């Protein structure tokens, strides 16, 4: 009998959009429209948060805050966050369809989990309007989770546990220790830990590595190892129970968690 009842996946960088590229250019363009230049690295720093919170975090970065102040004659305020957000969302809606390829191994991993009787949940930093573009494209490739919790669905998103609590209700699963959260970002791991679930970080398919599957495959082994170590160190600060390369590597971890639970261990 399985001790686990569900696995909850993030979306971009976890099951779609290897390297988590869809929002990056959009953040750069949204800020450009307000006369402020930002880099891809700066845009990646708060990744995983709801996009309004992400923009707030970017505007709090000292260099970007100073650039905004120089351009507009004052420090950014709440209305500025909303203004950038109002530009960002429709831009992201336009481009997200180009970044919906499944991460290799997603279909096979989910099939293996369902074969164990596990339910499949999902949370995301994307809004529901953006996910309306993503869901049918993922389904055509064979991935359709049992629920979806988006940024804006609840008063508080990542890194709080609220999205996970909604997953527990949607999926009709409990206790939290019977659930695994899988994510490529620190705040996504945080939401799992705050909710009391097992957590698995993804080092090479997501935001911390920031490379495509083809770019990763082309790297010499020494460079791939260095990239893995760099991404793992960043994720490790959020204390995931496990760190693996991609979702394709998850099934053995599920086996290990089951064995630990059989021995009475909990997250």
Image (cartoon, rainbow, N blue to C red):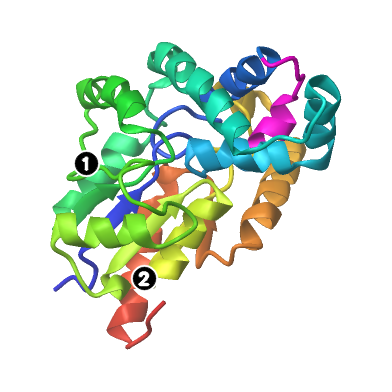
Does residue 116 show up?
no
Q: Is residue 233 left or right of residue 70?
A: left
Q: Is residue 41 magenta?
A: yes
Q: Which residue is painted at 15% across and 52% down in the image?
A: 115
Q: Quadrant of the C terminus?
A: bottom left
- How far from the left and from the top, in percent, is residue 264? 32, 88
In this rendering, is residue 222 above or below 173? Answer: above
Tell me if mark 1 has few (under 14), some (14-19) or many (20+) residues whose alpha carbon lies within 10 angstroms of its own: some
Q: In the rendering, at what x and y percent does residue 83 appear?
A: 56, 24
**Between residues 179 and 33, which one lies in front from this camera angle?**
33
Residue 222 x/y as whole percent: 76, 40
Q: Is residue 209 magenta?
A: no
- The residue lying at 41 percent from left, 34 percent from top is 126
Give whichever of discs 2 and 1 has the lower sequence position: 1
> What residue is disc 1 on?
145
Q: Quadrant of residue 100?
A: top left
Determine the secondary structure under disc 1: loop
Stretch of the chain drawn in magenta:
34-45
Work out how far the residue at label 2 is from the one at label 1, CA to CA, in angstroms. Answer: 21 Å
Q: Looking at this view, is 19 or 250 the one in front? A: 19
Q: Is residue 24 above or below residue 35?
A: below
Q: Circle 2 sits on which residue? A: 257
Report the residue at 39% width, 36% height from top. 15
């Amino acid at each position: 009998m399985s001790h686990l009842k569900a696995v909850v996946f993030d979306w971009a960088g976890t099951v779609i959009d290897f390297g988590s590229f869809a929002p990056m250019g959009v953040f750069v363009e949204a800020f450009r429209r307000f006369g402020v230049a930002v880099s891809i690295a700066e845009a990646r720093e708060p990744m995983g948060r709801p996009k309004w919170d992400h923009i707030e975090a970017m505007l709090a970065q000292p260099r970007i805050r100073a650039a905004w102040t120089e351009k507009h004659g004052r420090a950014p305020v709440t209305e500025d966050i909303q203004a950038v957000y109002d530009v960002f969302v429709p831009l992201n809606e336009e481009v997200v369809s180009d970044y919906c390829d499944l991460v290799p191994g997603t279909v096979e991993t989910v099939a293996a989990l369902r074969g164990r009787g596990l339910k499949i949940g999902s949370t995301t930093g994307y809004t529901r309007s953006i996910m309306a573009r993503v869901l049918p494209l993922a389904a055509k490739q064979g991935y359709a989770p049992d629920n979806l919790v988006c940024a804006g669905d609840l008063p508080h998103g990542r890194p709080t546990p609220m999205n996970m609590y909604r997953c527990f209700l949607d999926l009709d699963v409990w206790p939290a220790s019977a659930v695994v959260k899988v994510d490529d970002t620190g705040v996504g791991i945080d939401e799992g830990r705050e909710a009391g679930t097992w957590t698995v970080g993804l080092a090479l398919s997501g935001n911390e590595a920031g490379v495509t599957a083809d770019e990763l495959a082309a790297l010499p082994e020494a460079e791939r190892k260095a990239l893995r170590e760099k991404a793992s160190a960043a994720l490790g600060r959020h204390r995931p129970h496990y760190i693996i390369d991609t979702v394709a590597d998850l099934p053995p971890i599920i086996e290990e968690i089951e064995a630990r639970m059989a021995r009475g261990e909990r997250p």
